[in-house]
Amino acid sequence: MSQKKAVLFIADGLGGRPSDYNGKTCLEAADTPNLDRLADRGINGMLNPLGPGVRPGSDTAHLSLFGYDPEEVYSGRGIFEASGIGMKVQKNDVCFRTNFSTVDKEMEVKDRRAGRIQEGQEKLKEALQDGLELNRYKDLEIIFETSTQHRGALILRGSKLSDKITGTDPHKTDVKVKKCKAVNGSKNVKRTAKIVNKITDRAHELLKDLDVNKDREERGKPPANALLLRGASTPPDIEPFQEKYGLEGVGIAAGALYLGVAKQIGLETRKPEGATGDLDSKIINKAKAAVKELEDGKDFAFIHVKGTDNAAHDHDAEAKKRVIEKIDRAVGYLIDKLDWKNTHLIFSGDHTTPIVYGDHTAEPIPILYRGREVRKDWVDRIGERSSVKGDLGFVNGQEVLPILFNYNNWLEKYGS
Ligand code: ZN
Ligand code: ZN
């Protein structure tokens, strides 16, 4: 345990475009006195999470921010979702993220999220858990777990399985559920694709006549009568954070993906009370948890907020601005409570999510470092057009933590 502390605060999809908000980005339009104070007293720059011109996924961007090369360790999102919702994942498990969805008799997708189903998921889960054993595959175990709304994860456990297969989610409506395909001709790959297609058919059989769904149909809601699978992946072979950096770290988040990434790199994880991973999240409780964990002996705390990205995916500029202002209040708490004699902090995002486009784009995002060894620059507020004038310049994802840890004198010297 070190006296020194490090904090990485990531607002998902923080970055924006001038089309967000009358010529300003949401971050520029938001009222952010506390973030501006950090920018004023810190050093500022712009972050390319995966390098210039690469559109980041949240999972790959976070791996990069933690100092890992996604090219080496990333095989798909399923493993992080499964792990993030608390499933005990074993080596060689093939993991998927799943959606309850609505299909018609021809297996044409009518609603990819089954109307963002809010209740009855436990019954759906029971039906799947009891009925999914596919008798022909003796050594195969199928494990299913629900998460929030339509979301869930599924694990295939057994021998002769592979994650080199495509997903079944067509990502649009009025087209059929996709057939899972083998990416190459190997026997195990083909076998796994066959199993996934069987699961898809069987899940529809098991779900379509359940009371939960009859109820939904009577009330004019789309039934959750199909299961879409995507992001097939096995646990990555990853050097644990603790060994890589020699630090005890904790990840504080609510979104399954982020808890999952944190777990897979070996961080302890916390989901504070009231933290939802959505617009209504009690972000302040994440700041409180971080302060407590650092006081209790952790060297490093990662704080993740998801609402910024969700609002942008929903094309809702006002909501994104509101989440940024809520983040600012949590940052105010950190300014008050962190031991600034010993702490260095980063505030940034994992990618840009513009309001009009509603999905991730490749523009760099503001990043700032604050702490007593940080040489302050002339930037006095956070924002896409102000932060770029800072002395930090442009940094890449994998450089982010080493730059932070350098301020704490935690780095090994290169050479003598
Ligand atoms: Zn993201
Ligand atoms: Zn996103």
Image: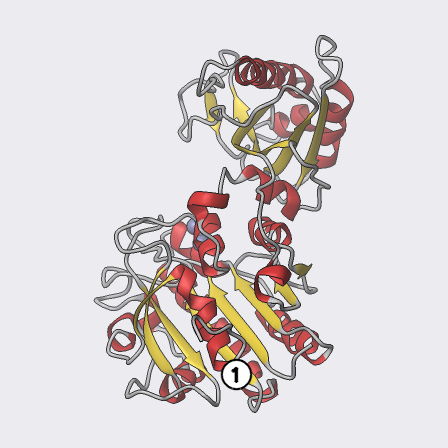
Q: What is the three-letter code of the residue carrying label 1?
A: Gly
| Closer to the camera in the image, 69 or 305 | 69
Looking at the image, which residue is at 75% across and 26% down? 129
- Judged from the image, the quadrant occupied by ligand 1 is bottom left
In the picture of the structure, the residue carrying the numbered disc 1 is 332
Give the x, y percent position of residue 104: 51, 17
Q: Answer with the quarter of the image where residue 114 lies.
A: top right
Image coordinates for residue 234, horizontal then vertical, percent: 59, 35
- Residue sitting at x 36%, y 82%: 43
23 up-or-down from 154: above or below: below
Determine if residue 39 is in view: yes
Q: Is 272 positioned to the left or the right of 34 in the image?
A: right
Quarter of the image containing the C terminus?
A: bottom left
- Check the image and report above or below for 316 versus 215: below
User: On the rendered image, what quadrant is the N terminus found in?
Assistant: bottom right
Q: Is residue 384 above or below residue 202?
A: below
Q: In front: 237, or 29?
A: 237
Which residue sits furthest front? 416
Tell me what residue is drawn at x 60 percent, y 82 percent.
Answer: 4
Whether 153 is drawn above or below 132: the answer is below
Q: Nearer the viewer, residue 128 or 162?
A: 162
Helix, strand or loop status at disc 1: helix
Circle count: 1
